[in-house]
């Protein structure tokens, strides 16, 4: 599914996001250099991510979709009547529709609150969900995970979705802090459905982030294109290589952009020039892979009691339901 110019031209949802300037200045001034992964998702980045989800090598989306398809009715049977649904990092909500379809069979209407930093993805989520499911009312929330007060304003019972293994893009402490923040904005009986990618054959994980068509490389390098456009930067994306590898000690895939030569890159809006040695990297993303035990412990550390965990036949991915007690 492509994020079309039609969706981009529509009235944007009023909730201005801070400029990326601060994050870029801070990240490129560090040693080693790094940039927060949320910056990967401008309109082009969201579109490239959608393309990634359809790649033959990128197993997480279709594996999780399989779990949700097989178990949707059972998952919904754990929910109280008239539950409102929120989702963190919803993207285009393609997989979410699997659950929403089951939910509208169990209750007359559903209020769905997708939160995302990508306006383009949110607009598409609203269009696609409402055109397929007339009994779902979509309330897009443009913003960052650090403000979750919108959860508190919904009438209970509540279900929060944090699927797609987006939790894997956070380091362990940040993941626990986010789960605790979700829990703080919920009440007894509210639930969280958490989807996470599991550790498996290294070759399978490696291929998912080093696809033959080079879409993940474009997704990674788009960060530099974004900085050029939004901050009048002078990166030559062709002088950086997409690097992705499995870090066994940390149980994560890492994404980096590696400078192919010694170079200086000016960013006009920051009034700064950043120097790169040949081979120097910008760390752009981590994608942690879990065991079921680790995933369930994360939920518990976040303040949830684990109700049930579903996996696929190969145990490549897990979806776990936690409840506030
Ligand atoms: N949940 C979808 C999309 C995953 S892609 C799926 O499973 O396919 C990750 C999504 O999280 C992107 O749409 C991105 O824009 C959003 N995102 C990343 N960091 C975020 C942050 N800090 N706050 C809000 N949204 C974020
Ligand atoms: C959104 N997130 C869970 C994806 C992942 O697999 O970590 C982002 C991604 N990065 C490269 N490919 C996909």
Image: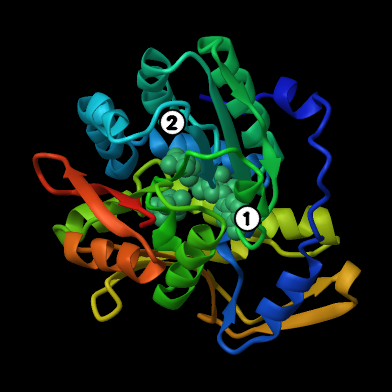
Which residue is drawn at the image coordinates 80% and 68% (left, top)? 21
Q: Could you tell me if the residues under marks 2 and 1 are in contact, i.e. CB atoms within 8 Å?
A: no
In the image, is residue 276 above or below residue 202?
Answer: below
Please give left or right for residue 126 compared with residue 173 in the image.
right
Say which quarter of the image contains residue 254: bottom left
Inspect this view and state whether residue 320 appears. Answer: yes
Which residue is drawn at the image coordinates 78% and 58% (left, top)? 228
Say which quarter of the image contains residue 161: top left
Please give left or right for residue 191 compared with residue 297 in the image.
right
Query: SS of the residue at dot 2?
Result: helix
**Residue 98, percent from left and from top:** 37, 24
Please give left or right for residue 101 compared with residue 72 in the image.
right
- Whether the residue under disc 2 has CB within 8 Å of ligand 1: yes
Residue 148, disc: 1
Separation (CA) of disc 2 from disc 1: 19 Å
- Closest to the observer: 2 or 136? 136
Query: How is the structure coloured here?
Result: rainbow
Residue 80, disc: none
Mark nearer the viewer, 2 or 1? 1
**Residue 235, percent from left and from top:** 72, 64
Say which quarter of the image contains residue 130: top right
Q: Quadrant of the C terminus?
A: bottom left
Residue matched to label 2 = 96
Looking at the image, which residue sits at the far left? 313
């Amino acid at each position: 599914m492509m994020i079309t110019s039609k969706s981009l031209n529509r009235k944007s949802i009023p909730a201005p996001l801070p400029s990326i300037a601060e994050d870029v200045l801070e990240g490129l001034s560090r040693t080693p250099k790094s940039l927060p992964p949320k910056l990967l998702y401008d309109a082009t980045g969201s579109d490239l991510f959608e393309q990634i989800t359809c790649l033959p090598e990128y197993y997480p989306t279709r594996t999780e979709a399989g779990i949700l398809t097989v178990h949707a009715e059972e998952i919904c049977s754990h929910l109280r009547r008239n539950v409102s649904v929120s989702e963190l990092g919803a993207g285009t909500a393609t997989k979410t529709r699997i659950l929403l379809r089951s939910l509208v069979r169990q209750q007359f209407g559903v209020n769905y609150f997708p939160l995302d930093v990508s306006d383009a993805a949110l607009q598409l989520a609203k269009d696609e969900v409402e055109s397929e499911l007339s009994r779902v009312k979509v309330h897009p929330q443009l913003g960052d995970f650090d403000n979750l007060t919108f959860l508190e304003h919904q009438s209970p019972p509540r279900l929060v979705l944090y699927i797609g293994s987006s939790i894997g893009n956070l380091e362990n402490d940040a993941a626990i802090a986010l789960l605790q923040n979700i829990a703080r904005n919920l009440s007894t009986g509210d639930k969280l459905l958490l989807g996470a990618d599991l550790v498996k054959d290294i070759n399978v994980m490696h291929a998912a982030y080093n696809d033959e068509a080079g879409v993940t490389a474009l997704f990674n390098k788009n960060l530099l294109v974004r900085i050029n456009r939004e901050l009048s930067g002078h990166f030559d994306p062709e002088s950086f290589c997409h690097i992705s590898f499995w870090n066994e000690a940390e149980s994560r895939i890492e994404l980096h952009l590696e400078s192919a030569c010694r170079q200086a890159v000016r960013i006009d809006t920051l009034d700064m020039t950043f120097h790169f040695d040949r081979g120097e990297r910008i760390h752009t993303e981590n994608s942690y892979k879990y065991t079921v035990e680790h995933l369930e412990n994360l939920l518990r550390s976040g303040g949830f009691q684990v109700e049930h965990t579903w996996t696929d036949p190969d145990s490549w991915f897990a979806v776990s339901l936690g409840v506030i007690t």
